[in-house]
Amino acid sequence: MSVVVLVGNPRPQSRTREAAELVAGRLTDRQPDRTVELADLGPALFDPQDPRVAEAAAEVQGASLLVVASPTYKASYTGLLKLFLDGLGSGSLAGVTAVPLLLGAHWRHSLAAELQLKPVLVELGATVPTRGLFLLDADYTASEELEKWLTAARPQVAASLGAEPVRVVS
């Protein structure tokens, strides 16, 4: 099983990346195999023939589990993430189980992952077995919302992947 994290934050090494890697780790009980930081690709994202962009797209399309993360900008995900996803062909995420994750400063944006990012992933062919996850960027590491979401999401993701759910030992 290949676990990939896709980060749409314009700043590399962000809290968004940390949160996405945390979610991937808590879902699978292991670190992601690869993290794709779109900020590292910068202007190359405008050229889908760029070898680094093509490699990132191949990593994302070849993932068994893909955690797609972005900060919340204007009640949605970033333009950087949109630019990358727009470069993927329709149906190109078929066979990929995806988890939409947005970080934001206020709960009033809590539906953005479900209403903005999840439909795009489904349009690209991904299976999205969980509700979109929104976390406050101030407390994502110790979030009660994350714990509740993980309780519901682990069996859903495991079923989508054809695997046994991660067992949490208290």
Image: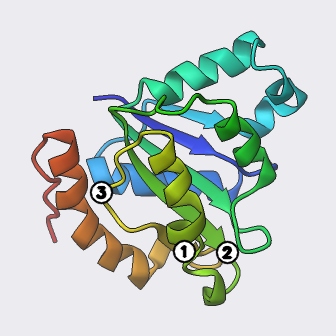
Query: Callout 2 environment at 10 Å: few (<14), some (14 to 19), or many (20+)?
Result: many
- The tally of labels here is 3
Residue at horizontal 70%, vertical 81%? 105
Q: Along the horizontal axis of the image, is 32 left or right of 8?
A: left
Q: Quadrant of the C terminus?
A: bottom left
Q: Which residue is mark 1?
A: 135
Q: Along the horizontal axis of the image, is 20 left or right of 154?
A: right
Q: For the residues marked 3 and 2, what is the alpha-carbon distance in whole angstroms?
A: 22 Å
Q: Amino acid at mark 3?
A: Pro
Residue 27 picture quarter: bottom left
Q: Of circles 3 and 2, which is in front?
A: 3
Q: Are marks 2 and 1 in contact (CB under 8 Å)?
A: yes
Q: Position of residue 70 (x, y in %)?
A: 65, 57
Instruction: Please say which color scheme the image uses.
Output: rainbow
Q: Is residue 58 above or below residue 111?
A: above
Residue at horizontal 79%, vertical 39%? 39
- Dot 3 or dot 1, earlier in sequence: 3
Badge number at residue 26: none
Q: Amino acid at mark 2?
A: Gly
Q: Which residue is mark 2?
A: 104
Query: Callout 3 environment at 10 Å: few (<14), some (14 to 19), or many (20+)?
Result: some
Q: Is residue 136 above or below residue 130?
A: below
Q: Could you tell me which secondary element the residue under label 1 belongs to? A: strand
Badge number at residue 129: 3
